[in-house]
Amino acid sequence: MTRTKSKSLPAGIARRNPSLSSSEVKELLMAQRAEKKLKRKLAGEGRVEGTVPVSAGGDGKKVNESEVRLPEVCEAERKRRKKQKNKKSKKVSISNGQQLESPDSRDDEEEGQENHYGLQRGSHSYGIQPLGNLFLSTSGRNVRDVGLGTLQVLNDETIIDILSNLDGRDLARLALVSKAFYVFAHQDSLWRNLVLDNYKGELGFQGCWKTTYLASLVPKYAGPPHLPLKVKDFYSDYLFQSWLCASLEIKPDWLSTDNIEKRENLSVEEFIRDFEEPNKPVLLRGAMDSWPALKKWNREYLLKHAGDIDFAAGPIHLKLSDYYKYADVVEEERPLYIFDSKFAEKSPQLAADYEVPVYFREDLFSILGIERPDYRWLIAGPARSGSSFHIDPNSTSAWNAVVRGAKKWVMYPPEVVPPGVFPSPDGADVATSVSITEWFMNFYGETKKRAEKPVECICRAGEVVFVPRGWWHVVINLEESIAITQNFVSRSNILNVLEFLSRPNSQHLVSGTKDRVNLHEKFRTRYEALYPGSIEAIKQKTEEREASLRAQKTSIWDNAADVMTGGFKFGF
């Protein structure tokens, strides 16, 4: 006779508890079985009527066996109650009959994973786990390889690159092929690119890029939001890392070092002597105390005066009101970041709310008038937004003033390439981490081990950072922030700028202007016409200063002005 398991017990539980889902019925059944197991164990040890012996740590008093609970029973009941309080757990089928777990179902290993990484939100929406977890899996299989078939030999980055050539309809079809393709075809970066590539002036961000894409096709789209389905046993470092970088908390260790020199009530002469000529960064306090923006600028003020104005944010221009709706709900590795060079022309009111600090008012590029390269930007973005490692354009120096929020800075002098940063030989391009968080996660620890330590600081509202020419820097917003930044050319760095603009490959290096080829000639000609003999005098003064520095055997860190460098474009 073939033995079969009785179904009367689960059915009875279901009848007595009609509000429970099937998975919750199973969990309750497991709890009851665990209780029976405990009873049998107690009986086998000679315990009578549920009495707990003193040697076992009890008080010899009889207890009700129904009140005895194993740890796993308590855990099962805790989970059941948690699910019952929130949402019933479901199994959802896709077209080929495979079952995926609903977002409310979470594996124990994923819960541990959250605590291990220190995340701001729960486990991965699609259940993706780091590849190392495969070695701890009881199934011993990776759904990725099974679902990709012969394509499993390709790495995940290559697969994403291939899928980036598909349109939304093809991605949706591909998601029905297998669990693996369901996960790959739902990567938010693919749908983000589709939205931005087909952007028509209104973003209307819906909380995730796939739903936003559908809404862009059907303006009155009122369908349900996309609800990710968790796939068990899917392991991928590449896909997991993108989500991890968007979910990871900013670690206190990343913020602990603050070694920049800070000055207040500095005279212009002292600033030039101590920082601009030696090419050293400094954090200035009190330099923007007179700005109306410090008192006025917040989200409400900006929306009132510029809410309907289109600002540059990555590859698109969008209304400020639409941007803040996006920033309020976005959870992604690289949030869009307002970085607009024409903000003053678009909103004269915003331009009237600030003035250039006294230390930076010598701006020689201004002699070019409307032909000058882009030089000032309004910067706004949520926490985690910012700019990856770069050197400011055209060998200029810069200042960055925080009006609201706070920014973490990490800076390296021109002669030291930061860890995880790989500039091309001609200086035209820079390869670095996909996101700022990824760099901090993978490379910030290396800065502590190197002999050449970076200059670091947190710049808060009312403070200004001076960024000398040629210095590498990465900036990440620690909270929603608003800032103004400008690049400038003074007599202290005009020789470097002229040398940079005259390089043979300058047409590939110069940025912020349409006339890259003739910028050097225009600038030099106009400057010499206004200040005849000035360039030779500056050369002589610079040579004397360098000779004095060499005589003092100054270190390369204090003599960064000796290095003729610059030319890397913004890396946003």
Image: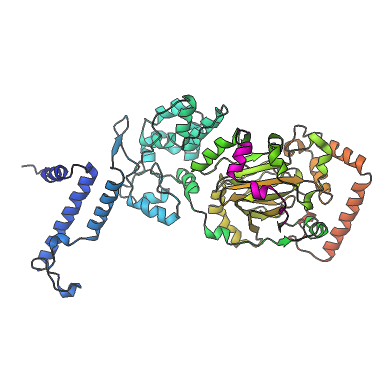
Number of numbered labels in the structure image: 0
Q: Place residue 269 in its image quadrant.
A: bottom right
Question: Where does residue 124 sit, x and y in percent of width and height?
Answer: 41, 45
Which residue is depicted at the point 50% across and 35% down? Answer: 205
Q: Is residue 243 visible?
A: yes
Inspect the magenta stretch and tell me whether residue 254 lies in it.
no
> Does any portion of residue 502 appear in the rendered image?
no
Q: Confirm whether the magenta stretch covers residue 296.
A: yes
What residue do we see at 77% from left, 60% from top?
A: 266
Query: Taking 152 as reference, is 269 above or below it?
Result: below
Looking at the picture, does residue 431 appear above or below residue 451?
Answer: above
Magenta part of the chain = 284-309
**Percent x, y for residue 175?**
39, 31
Residue 133: x %, y % from top left? 39, 51
Foreground residue among 169 and 481: 481
On the image, the x and y values in percent for residue 90 come to 28, 40
In which quadrant of the rendered view does residue 94 lie? top left
